[in-house]
Amino acid sequence: MDLLTANDAPGAYPPSFYAAKWGHLPPLPPAEGDVRADVAVVGAGFTGLTTALHLTRRGYSVVVLEAQRVGFGASGRNGGQVGIGHRVEQDVLEEMVGDDDARALWALARQSVAAVKRLAAHPDVGVTYHPGLIHADHKRAFVRDSHAYVDRLRATYGYQDMVPLDRDEIREMVGSPGYYGGTLDSRSGHIDPLAFALGVSRLVQEAGVRVFEGTRVQAVQPGSEVTLVCEGGAVVRAPWVVLACNGYLGGLEPSVARHVMPINNFVVATEPFAEEDREGIIAANRAVADSRFVVNYFRFSEDGRLLFGGGESYGYRFPKDIAATVRRPMLRVFPQLAEVKIDFAWGGTLAITRSRMPHFERVAGNILSMSGYSGHGVALGTIAGEIAAEAIAGQAERFDLMARVPTPPFPGGAVLRSPLLALAMVWFALRDRL
């Protein structure tokens, strides 16, 4: 199945701002012939790389198979926001899974942000973590619930790092007339995602993991020793397999595909702003995500470019003019940027679930899959590898916790999920504007 879009070229990073900085590394070789390992990991994004890292630290021999380049998918294209919590709030999780599991999921979410910060700070990764993430309410009616949620996190979960913002406070922090309040989380933050993925890849390779690029897995043959048949003729055999494909799973594993839906999101990078001008757009170099169903999210890069994400599409179809697609929501948020030049525009494919919670599945006893991060993949995708390594080593409590979270299949399965979701998204987009 061809999972490339018009934004992609085989074996090359998409034309993103991140790739312009970091995408010039020579490719790693593809797998050839018969390859054996204790664990074979499919996908070299955050989940696949951290799975390999934690397994090799436990003494396993690991190979990572990547169809394109390390960090080619959502891991190397996203907005770089590292948010604590999950895509749904804790009160919803309490109803969904019960109080005990909701508390455990909150603890895991805090651990996920800590895992990103710890890896980013490793000398061989060397990526700066910038603290501060603002949730911006685009409707006045949402502000009361946002402030109540701050109180709930303090009272029920002992979380003191989030504060409420009223209209005046958020307008001091975000130079937009379109927000009425929100919250500021000082523990969450943002990073350069492709630099992070490449840094973790360096750690993995230094630890002895074989990472193969240009190696697309075409079939997974279960058994006590799983066989992976690769495009080009390579065959990989391992007692354990981890599927870390997220939005690029395609039809490789139908049981997972029923529960996860690939969607595309789009980002632009403007020309650089002077430091004093940045403060009038986002103060103190924080990141921002708003309350729209199709979320707008934005932050500044290290060199002062506004990185603004907005707009979605379904399947593997991208708009012809990504810059124009994203400029529309950017100007709704920041009308004063009408004359600002856009230097880079790109898209990427992530995966969502119906419940907006990640889908963890034991496809077979020795085949694990983690995907469907629903926009929280930087933090949750990173800790997923740690959780997978624990499960393979016989400590499956956190994997089983995630696997218990309901992620119902999409109606119509993999065939009808795209048109049905597109209809739903049109309705939600209209609701955002009311």
Image (tube, rainbow, N blue to C red):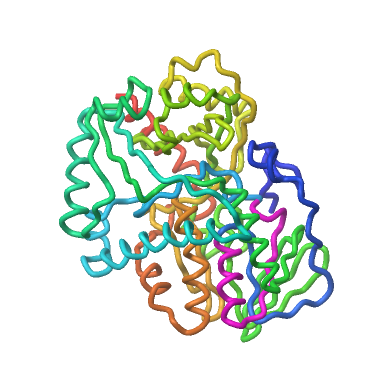
50 magenta-colored? yes
Give the residue at x 52% y 75%.
389
Residue 300 rendering spot, x and y as whole percentages:
51, 34
Q: Nearer the viewer, residue 202 or 249?
A: 202
418 magenta-colored? no
Location of residue 229 by image quarter: bottom right
Residue 201 rendering spot, x and y as whole percentages:
65, 61
Residue 345 rendering spot, x and y as whole percentages:
62, 31
User: From the image, which quarter does the C terminus lie in?
Assistant: top left
Give the residue at x 27% y 63%.
102
Question: From the viewer's perspective, is 184 left or right of 94?
Answer: right
Question: From the viewer's perspective, is 61 left or right of 106?
Answer: right
Q: From which residue to which does the magenta span run?
A: 47-71
User: From the image, which quarter does the N terminus lie in?
Assistant: bottom right
Question: From the viewer's perspective, is 79 left or right of 71?
Answer: left
Residue 38 rendering spot, x and y as whole percentages:
65, 82
Question: From the viewer's perspective, is 417 left or right of 59?
Answer: left
- Up the image or down, 171 lies above or below 121; here it is above
- Up the image or down, 208 lies above or below 359; here it is below
Q: Nearer the viewer, residue 433 or 281?
A: 281
Give the residue at x 50% y 60%.
382
Give the residue at x 20% y 31%.
141
Number of numbered callouts drawn:
0
